Image: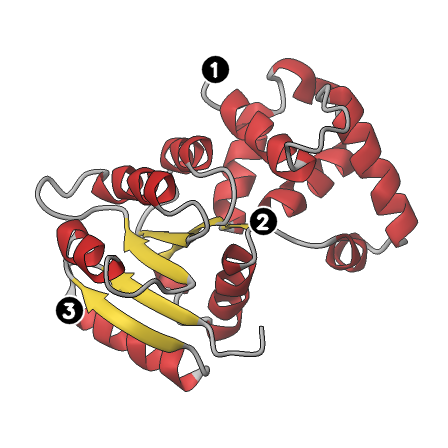
Amino acid sequence: MNNPLTVALCDDSGIFRQGLSMLLEAAGVTVTASTGSGPELQAVLRKSMPDVVILDVRMPPTHTDEGIQLAAQLHREHPGLGILVFSTYVDPDWATRLLKDVPVGVGYLLKDHVTDARTLIDALHRVAAGSIALEPEVVATMLTAARQAGPLARLSDQERRVLALIAEGHSNEAIADRIAVSERTVESHIAAIFRSLDLPPNPEFNRRVQAAVAYLHANRR
């Protein structure tokens, strides 16, 4: 992107928002708004639309899953808006719900990892571009639980590793680098994953996203 990435924050902790704003601004990201609740954020979005919103999972009034519900509502109202959700816990059920309701332009990261500016900025750019950015620990938890579920049981260990990296939002080039194989080999693994998950070419769907969602759903069985 030629223009600075723009981000709006929504978290009921003012101290957390202040620290996150400082981190983002230092990395060249423009923070357009800092809000403490869903209604405040929605009022801001009616006036100015950022590239990405960052939401906490637990927000007022019940401090349970308001962030997941808000993410789904924002996606319905603003389909092109990137949504990055933060959580204090590794919760595969929340991540699965998030991916079901917001299948593109979405991320799920742990708050404890926010201090890693490079990872955060990379996740924001992925989400803004319409891709997925999932916390590796969350992906690992889901993948372990999903290994015996349905068509995922047909995947090899290497294919499951590739699928996990796809879910994290990595490109073929990045996947090849991480597992020390050629991009062509990665392409072969992805083709095998699509076959195993019965995902034929379809111009209306992103098969990489559908593959990630397939095993996330399998974790809930």
Q: Residue at x 26, y 43 (%)?
A: 70
Is residue 42 in sight in this rendering?
A: yes
Q: How many angstroms separate mark 2 from mark 3 (CA)? A: 28 Å
Q: Earlier in the sequence, mark 2 or mark 3?
A: 3
Identified by mark 1, the residue type is Arg
Q: Position of residue 47 (x, y in %)?
A: 24, 63
Q: Quadrant of the N terminus?
A: bottom right
Q: Which mark is residue 221?
A: 1
Q: Residue at x 46, y 50 (%)?
A: 80
Contact (Cβ within 8 Å) of mark 1 with mark 3: no
Callout 2 secondary element? helix
Identified by mark 3, the residue type is Gly
Q: Position of residue 84 (x, y in %)?
A: 40, 54
Q: Residue at x 68, y 16 (%)?
A: 151
Q: Is residue 50 left or right of residue 141?
A: left
Q: Earlier in the sequence, mark 2 or mark 1?
A: 2
Q: Is residue 168 left or right of residue 99?
A: right
State the residue in front, 198 or 113. 198
Callout 3 secondary element? helix
Callout 1 secondary element? loop
Q: Which mark is residue 14?
A: 3
Q: How many angstroms separate mark 1 from mark 3 (CA)? A: 38 Å
